[in-house]
Amino acid sequence: MSRSQAPASFVPEHDHQRCIHDAIDTAQALCEREGLRFTGLRKRVLELVWANHEPVSAYDLLKELRREKENAEPPTVYRALDFLQQINLVHRIESRNAYVGCEQPGESHVSRFMICSRCNKVAELVDEGRIHDAIAEEAARTGFRVESETVEILGICRTCQSKRQPSRA
């Protein structure tokens, strides 16, 4: 993605079905390569996470799964999410206690997100380490040892900025 190009999640006319299809294809290939089982439940949870570019809670995933299979239970959803996180197919948005699909699947990396406070869409940042380097430098300067790093940036996406806001009388 070029610096001037908006992330797909912030572009309303992008081919979202392609996002879902690509995520599933990538997951299947990754699991096959690593000798991991990509079960039907794991696949369905991944599809539901990618259903849109908004964070989705485990509870909402469970609710949707129960529409399809009445006996779906919370532990099965959490186990599927844990698996998908461990192999870098989904990320947990800490501030929302929810999950989004990973834009760099299968690669170990630090999570950095732009979150639109109006439409709730999320875009993962790919910064080649600039943010990480700045955090590491400041941590070293202050003698702080970083154990975990997640960056969440709240703001308003281009689409929401262009929408006319209702006047407040």
Image (cartoon, rainbow, N blue to C red):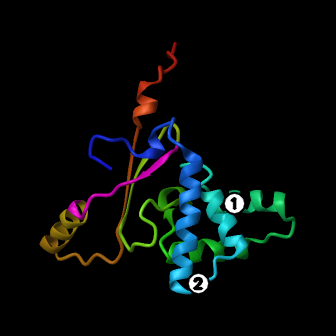
Residue drawn at point x = 58 percent, y = 77 percent:
83
Camera-side residue: 154 or 6? 6
* Residue lying at 50% horizontally and 76% vertically, measured from the top left: 87
Residue 3 picture quarter: top left
The residue that disc 1 covers is 61
Horizontal arrangement in the rendering, residue 46 relative to residue 135 (left or right): right
In this view, the residue farthest toward the right is 70
Q: Which residue is mark 2?
A: 36
Q: Of helix, strand and loop, which one carries label 2?
A: loop
Q: Residue furthest left?
A: 141
Q: Is residue 10 magenta?
A: no
Counting from the top left corner in percent of width and height, residue 90 is at 52, 66
The correct choice, above or below, for 71 with respect to 67 in the image is below
SS assignment for the magenta stretch, majority = loop
Start and end of the magenta stretch?
120-130
Q: Are marks 1 and 2 in contact (CB under 8 Å)?
A: no
Measuring 35% from the left and 55% from the top, which residue is drawn there?
A: 125
Name above or below for residue 147 compared with residue 58.
below
Asked whether 123 falls inside the magenta stretch, the response is yes
Location of residue 93 in the rendering, given as x and y in whole percent from the top left corner: 49, 60
> Is tag 1's residue or tag 2's residue first in the polypeptide sequence?
2
Residue neighbourhood size for the residue with mark 2, other residues' Cα within 10 Å, grouped as few (<14), some (14–19), many (≥20): some
